[in-house]
Image (cartoon, grey):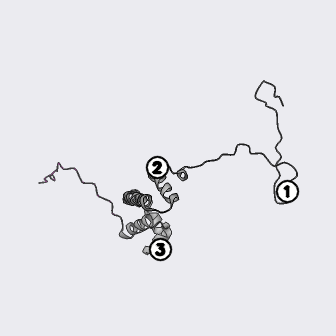
Amino acid sequence: MNTPAPVSNKAAKPVKARIPAKIRATIDLYTTERVSKTEAAKRIGIKPSYLYTQLTKVHIRDYERDRFAQYIQEIEDLKAPYKAEAFETAAELMRTAESENVRARMVEFLAGERKGNAVNVAVQVNNQAPTGYEYARPDQEVVVIRAGGDTQSPAEDSE
């Protein structure tokens, strides 16, 4: 007599894809030490082609993305204590520095009014093509651009 197999009401657990230890170590190396993927693979002792093949797999790309995010968060977490120490040092310099210049800069720094932090962007709008005679070497191609009339507009061009 054939008896059916017992049916479980539990949903099957998804199988977590395994990441080889050397691939994990290589990803950790190039995310934290900022070396190239090829260099990291060579340091760990695997072929770069094997690393790149493994990086085509979704679960390994996910690990790589998560590792980058984790590394960035670790760096962000380090930023706060250093910033606090910088403020303490600036306050100390403001109170005790003999130079009036140093004290004034620390006041600006602590007040957040440093002039050097601004980003300057300059856009040159009067770009003119060079005029006069230019020598074209034999291997260069010369292109002459001539002003043409507006063929799309019914209005007359005035020059």
Amino acid tagged 1? Ala
Q: Nearer the viewer, mark 1 or mark 2?
A: 2
Label 3 – label 1 distance at C-alpha: 48 Å
Quadrant position of the C terminus in the picture: top right
| Front-most of residues 105 and 124 | 105
Quarter where residue 2 is shown: bottom left
Q: Is residue 137 left or right of residue 25?
A: right
Local crowd at mark 2 within 10 Å, few (<14), some, or many (≥20)?
few
> Where in the figure is residue 33, as x and y percent of width and height?
45, 67
Q: Which residue is mark 3?
A: 42
Q: Quadrant of residue 146?
A: top right
Residue 147 inside the magenta-drawn segment = no
Secondary structure beneath disc 2? loop
Residue 31 shows up from this direction = yes
Q: Local crowd at mark 1 within 10 Å, few (<14), some, or many (≥20)?
A: few
Pointer 3 local density, CA inside 10 Å: few below 14, some 14–19, many at least 20: some
Distance between mark 1 and mark 2 Cα atoms: 54 Å
Residue occupied by mark 1: 136
Most extreme residue toward the right, as rendered? 133
The one nearer the camera, 86 or 144, is: 86
Residue 112, disc: 2
Range of magenta residues:
2-18
Q: Which numbered disc flags the more N-terminal residue, 1 or 2?
A: 2
> Percent from the top left, x then y, of residue 151?
79, 30
Q: Residue 42, image x and y in percent?
A: 47, 74
Lateral position of residue 137 relative to residue 9, left or right: right
